[in-house]
Amino acid sequence: MKDISCKLLVIGAGPGGYVCAIRAGQLGIDTVIVEAGKPGGTCLNVGCIPSKALIHAAEEYDRIVHLANGRNSLGIRTTKPELDLSQTIVWKDGIVGRLNSGVSGLLKKAKVKIVQGRARFRDGKTVEVETETGRQIIHAENVVIATGSAPVELPNLPFGGFVISSTEALALTSVPERLVVVGGGYIGLELGTAFAKMGAKVSVVEAQTRILPQYDAELTRPVAKRLQALGIEVMTGAKAKGLAKAGGTLLIEAEDGSEKSLAADKILVTVGRKPVTQGCGLDELVLDMDGPFIRIDERCRTSMRGIYAIGDVTGEPMLAHRAMAQGEMVAEIVAGHKRAWDKRGIPAICFTDPEIVTVGLSPEDARRTDVDVKIGQFPYSANGRAMTKMGEDGFVRVVARADNHLVLGIQAVGQGVSELAAAFGLALEMGTRLEDIAGTIHAHPTQGEAFQEAALKALGQELHI
Ligand SMILES: Cc1cc2nc3c(=O)[nH]c(=O)nc-3n(C[C@H](O)[C@H](O)[C@H](O)COP(=O)(O)OP(=O)(O)OC[C@H]3O[C@@H](n4cnc5c(N)ncnc54)[C@H](O)[C@@H]3O)c2cc1C
């Protein structure tokens, strides 16, 4: 097979890699992308998209089950629905398939050459790829490592049999009767909630003292309340110890030190994700590391000239939109543009029930800085649109500097608040002050009005509370 030479080689076609390659192609850079699996990476194939599809199906099903359960205040009468999860999975796979083709089409449109296979570094400028038709050697002036991340395995609960990762959970064709989720982070809770809505008896085992430990307790409280209402048992301060000899039972050490056992048909382990740095010949390079991640600077440059790294392989926050923003930036840097990472915030969303969205500093983070802060919070119980959607649990909170009212962070918890991430992100990125949000006409009746009211509250000018 004839060697390929290019200006830019991207390894991995997840959100980081494919965006980098598309932008590079648009800028006229001779670009090759290598992908071992399917275009779109974790996000499109076994992450963001399929999980949100499953969550949507579970929500729809649960809504009808709820309506069918006797009299409801909406006045809707219906009979109990049935769920055919195998059909749901066919629908979900259809969406994934369409997006796979979409990414391939966009890469082709940008004149990016796609090589299918696993890439392995020979040296900093040469990569070999095992393809179906033989070994392909690629020489590149610049290389972007965008190899992403994989689920963390617990040594005492290795994946296999009924111990599954999020990847297998997203492909189950029947709802397990009893599902134990080990790890109460966003992935475990999103999937655990979906399966509970689909009829599984779900238990969550979390080693820390509360669920979603990276978010402040006030934000997570409505989620904890809803988990309880859905009948999900949450065991905090509890550690998974391994499987009982008989199988089908998870042994745990409870908060008080006692040993307990939980019967399970599936055990979903979601205790984090690790960067994919093995198996691609990184040991042939001398890259500085930051713990398990590849160390990068504000231009995503690694310690080797001409080698960049983007996305999950470079550390937290491991989010698709961070990977995409890095990818776009690196393509422009390779094209000679003057770019550096100067983002003020990266929104993060938990698609739990209710949803959580955060961008910028939490009140606690802000108080740790030297400046005095003002905080305005507006509850959804006082928002007309939330009432009409029966989603009154939650709030929007704005954190700002006390002296000049510059907004430092925005958080919300509530039904459907994920869509407010755009407004929150824009506000932070534009360097808005409380007065800018308070002085913007927000359409009525919308949940977004709570954003304006939170800013008004921080200014001591609240109108609707
Ligand atoms: C269940 C779940 C839900 C999630 N939900 C969200 C969400 O709602 N929002 C969000 O922002 N993020 C979410 N994430 C995280 C998101 O998927 C990742 O942050 C994102 O995919 C990272 O993109 P990436 O480009 O860095 O890597 P990845 O998407 O992991 O892509 C890396 C690609 O590189 C390929 N690759 C690796 N090694 C090689 C090699 N040697 N040669 C060739 N190819 C290689 C892999 O096959 C893979 O396709 C979720 C993750 C999971 C698991």
Image: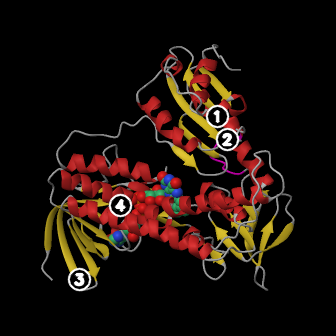
Label 1: which residue? Answer: 385
Residue 291 on image: x %, y %: 48, 57
From this view, report whether residue 239 is shown above or below residue 23.
below
Towards the viewer: 102 or 460: 102
Q: How is the image coloured?
A: secondary structure
Was residue 98 drawn as part of the magenta stretch in this picture?
no
Label 1 lies in ligand 1 vicinity (Cβ under 8 Å): no
Foreground mark, 4 or 2?
Answer: 2
Label 4 neighbour load within 10 Å: few <14, some 14-19, many 20+: many
Residue contact at pointers 3 and 1, CB within 8 angstroms: no
Give the quadrant of the C terminus: top right
Foreground mark, 3 or 1?
Answer: 1
Element marked by disc 1: helix
Residue contact at pointers 2 and 1, CB within 8 angstroms: yes
Label 3: which residue? Answer: 135
Q: How far apart are marks 4 and 1 (CA)?
A: 42 Å
Label 4 lies in ligand 1 vicinity (Cβ under 8 Å): yes
Towards the viewer: 155 or 428: 428
Label 2: which residue? Answer: 389
